[in-house]
Image: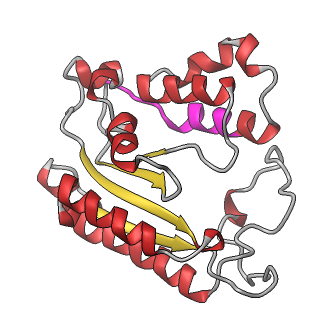
């Protein structure tokens, strides 16, 4: 599964723009060679880019890395989320292996609107979800509300990312998910289960890939 995330919450600047161009254009590794845009990037972004280059290996010799579904996520704070969704999955800027026919260019898409409850109620986000469903289809759109804790930042017992943290990973300035309450965590789990059971596995079976 490939995911595009609209940059929000301060993740902006020339380096962010360059990364998005490389990601959507299918040449992520090129960013590492653009020293003028890369040298001033934050350490967490450099680590993200390194990991993305490592795992996003589009090979024309096998089908293990062929995209099965694209999860396109946009913040509810975006003033024009419909346009942003369209921009993030630009069929004119697909990776070369998709355009050349080595991979199936008809990648299924699921559109996710992410609302941060620390920014206020989800009424506006719900209205935008209705617009999304009118544009992209009711079954292909979801709303995910996060950071619903009304108390001080909480310490979750289990860090879901702990097993993926390496020695090279940047040290977070605060605990991850410190505003996620139990309802948020369950909603994220339900979203992932729905994606797997209703979209990812059926798409793999339709295209002849065995998920097991």
Above or below residue 65? Residue 17 is above
| Number of callouts | 0
Question: Is 102 on the left or on the right of 167, as rendered?
Answer: left
Which secondary structure class fits the magenta region best? helix
Question: Is 184 on the left or on the right of 113, as rendered?
Answer: right
The residue at 78%/83% (across/down) is 154
Where residue 204 sits: x, y (%)?
22, 54
The residue at 53%/38% (across/down) is 55
Who is closer to the viewer here, 83 or 109?
A: 83
The quarter of the displayed image where residue 160 is located: bottom right
Where residue 4 sits: x, y (%)?
45, 43
Is-magenta flag for residue 147?
no
> Which residues, given as a range, are shown in magenta?
48-60
The quarter of the displayed image where residue 47 is located: top right
Where residue 11 sits: x, y (%)?
67, 42
Who is closer to the viewer here, 96 or 151?
A: 151
Is-magenta flag for residue 58?
yes
């Amino acid at each position: 599964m490939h995911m595009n995330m609209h940059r929000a919450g301060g993740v902006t600047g020339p380096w962010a723009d360059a990364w998005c161009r490389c990601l959507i254009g299918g040449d992520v590794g090129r960013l590492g060679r653009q020293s003028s845009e890369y040298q001033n990037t934050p350490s967490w972004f450099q680590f993200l880019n390194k990991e993305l280059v490592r795992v996003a290996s589009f090979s024309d010799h096998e089908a293990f890395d062929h995209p099965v579904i694209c999860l396109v996520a946009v913040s509810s704070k975006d003033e024009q989320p419909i346009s942003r969704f369209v921009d993030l999955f630009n069929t004119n800027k697909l990776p070369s292996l998709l355009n050349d026919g080595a991979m199936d260019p008809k990648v299924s898409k699921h559109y996710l609107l992410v609302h941060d409850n620390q920014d206020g109620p989800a009424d506006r986000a719900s209205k935008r979800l209705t617009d999304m469903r009118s544009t992209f289809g009711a079954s292909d759109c979801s709303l995910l509300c996060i950071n619903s804790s009304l108390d001080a930042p909480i310490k979750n017992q289990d860090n879901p990312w702990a097993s993926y943290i390496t020695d090279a990973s940047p040290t977070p300035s605060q605990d991850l998910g410190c505003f996620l309450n139990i309802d948020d965590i369950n909603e994220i789990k339900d979203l992932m289960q729905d994606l797997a059971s209703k979209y990812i596995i059926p798409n793999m079976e339709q295209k002849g890939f065995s998920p097991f």
